[in-house]
Amino acid sequence: MISKQAITATNNLRSIFPFASARQAFGAVLKTLAIEHGEILLPAYIGWSSREGSGVFDPIAALDLDYCFYALDERMHIDLESLRTALLTGKIRVLVIIHYFGYVDPSYKEAVRMAREHGVFVVEDEAHALLSDVITGICGREGDVSIYSFHKMLPLESGGAAVVNHPESDWWHGLHPMPEARLVLSDYDLHTIATQRIANALTVDRLIRELAPLVEPLWGSPRDGEVPQTYPVLIRTCSRDHLYYAMNAAGFGVVSLYHTMIEQITPERYPHSHAISHCILNLPVHQDASPDDMKAMIRTLALLLEESRCIA
Ligand SMILES: Cc1ncc(COP(=O)(O)O)c(C=O)c1O
C-alpha cells in the first residue's frame, strides 16, 4: 500500500538547533550528554591559533572532560587500527569525526560502525562540510549529531548549529538553542554555492598538476558529493610560510589549516599530523571566486615558486 501523500511524521526527522558558532554547539552537546566518566576520542589533527584558540578542543577543555586521540595517516586519513585500539580500552564515550575541508574520509562509515559496536556516541564535526551534508548528503547522517559552522562557508560573522539525527532518542532533551542565534540555511542559494565551489576545486585540481612535484594535492579533486571548503595542497620542498605570506600579499587568501597543532598532539606521538601541519596550504575555492580567478591564483603560485627558485 502507498498513501497518496507522505504521512509518517517521524520519517527522516532531523532537528537543527542554532548556536552562535560550531564550538558553542559542540560544547552544548557535550554538556547535555552529562559525561561523568569516559573519554572523548578525537582525531589527532586539531589546530590552535592565538586569535581563534581551538574550535574543536576548547569546548573539551572548558568542560574539563577526559580525552584521547586516534591517529591519522600520512595522507590525513583515519588510521583504523589506532581507532580500534582506542575503542578497545572500553573508556570511550564519544567519538568525534571531522570532515576536514568538506571532504569525507574513505573510512568514515567503517569508523562509525566500529564506534556503534562499542556503544559509543558519534559526533560529526561538519564545520567545513555544511554543504557536503545539506546539499549532497554524503556525510552527517551516520552519527548521532552533526555540528555546523555557518561563517566558515557563508559570508557571515558567526553562526553554527547542532543537528540531532534521531530526535526519537532522548539524550538531547536538555539541549537548548541560543535564543539570539538564527538558522540561516534558507537565506542563501546553497545549491549554487555548492556547484561553484566544486567547479572551482575541479579547475584548481586540473591546473595544479602542472606544479608537481613542488605542489602536491593532499586529496585531489573532490569526489562525488564532496563540496570543498578549501582545496588543500602540500608544499614540501620550499617554504610553505613564505608562499602563504606572498600569496596573501598578492591578493589570494590562502590559509593553513592548521599551521599549529594543539600542544596535546605531540610530534613524537603523531608525526604524520605534524608533517602535514608543517606543509599544508589551503587554497580558496569559495563562491565569490570564478574558475578564471582560480587560473590567476595558480599562475601567481607558479610565479612565486619560480621566484623563490623552487622551479629549476
Ligand atoms: C574542524 C573545525 N571544527 C570546529 C571549528 C569551530 O568553528 P566555529 O568558529 O564556528 O566555532 C573549527 C574552527 O575553528 C574547525 O576548524
Image: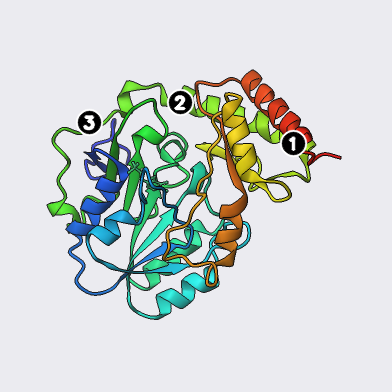
Q: How many residues crowd around disc 1 within 10 Å: few (fewer than 14), some, or many (20 or more)? A: many
In-image side of 262 versus 298 (left or right): left
Mark 3 to mark 1 CA distance (whole Å): 43 Å
Would residue 257 be found to the left or right of residue 153 on screen? right
Determine the residue positioned at 64% across, 38% down: 243
Measure how far apart labels 3 and 2 are at the Cα level.
20 Å
Instruction: Look at mark 1 in the image and give the residue it sits on.
Output: 305
**Residue at image location 41% in from the left, 48% down from the top:** 49
Residue 233 seen from this side: no
Q: Which label's residue is closer to the chain start, 3 or 1?
A: 3
Q: CA distance from mark 1 to mark 2?
A: 35 Å
Quadrant placement of the C terminus: top right
Image-based side of 312 in relation to 93, left or right? right
Can you say whether 109 is above or below 55 in the image?
A: below
Residue 182, disc: 3
Instruction: Residue at the far bottom: name it.
Output: 89
Amino acid found under the numbered disc labelled 2: His
Which residue type does callout 1 highlight? Leu
What percent of the width, then of the height, locates residue 4?
Answer: 29, 30
As drawn, the residue found furthest toward the right would be 312
**Image coords of residue 73 (percent x, y):** 59, 63
Q: Is residue 247 above or below residue 114?
A: above
- Camera-nearest residue between 148 and 20: 20
Could you tell which of marks 1 and 2 lies nearer the N-terminus?
2
